[in-house]
Amino acid sequence: MRRQRTRLLIAGVLLWLLTAASAPWWPALPGIAWLDGQLENAWFQLRGPRPTSGQVAIVAIDDASLAQLPAPTVYWGTYYAEAVRRLSRTGAEVIALDIYFAELPLLGGRATEAERQMKALEVQANTELGAALAEARFVNNCMVLLAAFIEDGRLKPPRQELIAGAGGGYDTLGAINLLTTTARDEVVREFALRWPAVEEGSPDVISLPYLAAHELCDPCREAWYSSSYGLQTARINYAGPAGTIPRISLADVIRATPEELAELSAQWRGGLVFIGDTAMPQDTHVTPYSRPFLGGGEFERMPGVELLANVTDATLAGRQLEPLPSWPLTILAAMMLLLSGLAIYLWPWLAGVLVDLGLAAGVASWGYYWFLGDTLVPVGALIALLIVHGALARLVRNVLLERERRRLAHYFSRYTSPQALKHVLDDEERRLLAGERCEVVVMFYDIRGFTTMSERAEPDAAIAFLTAFHDRMAGIIAAHGGWVDKFLGDGALVIFGFPISDPGAPLKAVGCAKQMIAAAADFTPLSGEGRVAIGVGLHFGPVVIGNVGSATKLDFTAIGDTVNTAARVQDLCKQHGRPLLMTGELAAYLGRDQRLVALGAAQVRGRSAVELYTCASAVSEE
């Protein structure tokens, strides 16, 4: 068993090391990523809206603006120009237009006069917007940023007159693409902050919200440009559900009186303003707040302009959601799996399951705690890792221990009853090995005259005789619920009533002794003459049963005065000419049907006299 335990420990350590080392790769698995996403949704909804930076606002092209501003949207350059002038004059530091102004198509030679007039109005509106951008940049010292697309790896800029008006060239363009891995019907969790350049020597493309944040945060801009390269993404630490970032209707900004505008400007003064559409359903996205995790509520998408504003706000607040790095994740997984493995190795299966449930709850709780500190722990991956490790550890444990269990069962099945054997094998807490005080029937039996017989016989014949004899006796003992503690040369120490307490143990022990005496007579002595006789001594009383021995040799046995008395009683069998003797303590538990015969008191070594009894049915040795 000790060797098997060592093998189990080695297998458990190897499994623990391999599973913990694989922790960094688990969050990328599809099913695990989905589970972590659901938990992330739960964390956001439990946390609720977080404090914003207070530096970001949205001027929304909302339903009210569409209803109150009469011109068709293709001519809204005039409205945008008025909004930019008013925002820059009243204290906005940065204005980011989440509106893509595509190049105007050229009119063909067959264009009608009406088409030419409409084209002229559109050009005039764009020209006015370009002039407003220039005024904001060069007169009011307000940085204006324009939206651009990345298409086939290349930047697709807006109209040239607007770029010229913004005055910053391509440095004023920010990409508004979502990551290609994000589907429109799924939660948007990541945003690209920087897109790598396609052509060698060309600069990387910065996203509009990231560019806006760093235009407002001048001290960190230099380090930002020098430390970042290639595709750089970030988990979006949403400030809250749709509507958390302050919104002002475009119509209210344009139509406000000077007094009203001064009051409204408190929401953007010294900060950053996004101008974008909140009424267009095509540009709305699913966020962690969209699907209610618990309870009811409506499914609510977030406008694209507010999604960009969330990226900027988290950057300005210094609260970007950072995934837990690989090495702390590995250490965390190793600690969790070590506790789980020890519970599986040391305790019964139910206790191990309870420990695993406690670890899962603890990881989830700490995951939420870390989330509040803007660190995203892959709780779903850790729980899945715990489940897989637990299943494998239990499988290894059961395979190794079941093999040892079958070996022990095969070995000891001849020496004890099936019920007692099952009780011993099921004792996972090793209570029996630690020692136990109980009341049992102790039996000693011994072959009469075997020492003399063995001296005259060949050694192999003597061993073969003893093996066959003890095998027969062990079968009878097991059939009566007894347990062979140990064989003592030509005799044995037998226990009844352990490890399962049995009120009928005295009666079973007497019945077993009678059958053993009869079975012994079926054997032919080594000398070939006469019959084999045995002496059986029985006593009932308290014993201590457990492991006894040294560090190098242990023996699981019974000790105590009861054992010594039973041995002395067996020694008296020959003196009294009886194959079976028992003490009065045992006889008190037997009925009249046993036809007990009192033999009087006898002195035994180490204690006062004992009353001896035998059964009339037991054959006399005389």
Image (cartoon, rainbow, N blue to C red):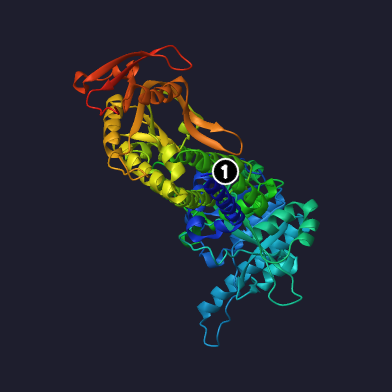
Residue appearing at x 31%, y 34% in the figure: 481
Label tally? 1
In terms of depth relative to the viewer, which is nearer, 325 or 502?
Answer: 502
Q: Is residue 140 left or right of residue 569?
A: right
For image coordinates 52% across by 43% down, the residue present is 345
- In the rendered view, would you say 358 is above or below 211? above
Front-lying residue, 529 or 251: 529
Residue 511 in the image: above or below residue 562: below
**Where is 162 relative to 266, above or below?**
below
Q: Quadrant of the C terminus?
A: top left
- Relative to the observer, which residue lies in front, 3 or 145? 3
As shown in the figure, which amino acid type bears the numbered disc 1? Gly
From the image, tell me which residue sits under label 1: 367
User: Which residue is situated farthest in the bottom direction here?
Assistant: 109
Q: Tag 1, which secondary structure?
A: helix
* 17 vs 576: above or below: below
Give residue 479's position: percent from left, percent from top.
29, 38
618 left or right, relative to 286: left
- Sort mark 1 into few (<14), some (14-19) or many (20+) by Cα contacts within 10 Å: many
Residue 321 visible to the viewer:
no
Q: Is residue 98 left or right of residue 464?
A: right
Residue 421, image x, y percentages: 37, 39
Q: Is any part of residue 549 visible from this angle?
A: yes
Residue 2 found in image quarter: top right
Q: Position of residue 200 (x, y in %)?
A: 74, 77
Q: Position of residue 221 (x, y in %)?
A: 78, 56
Residue occupying image coordinates x 61% and y 48% = 334
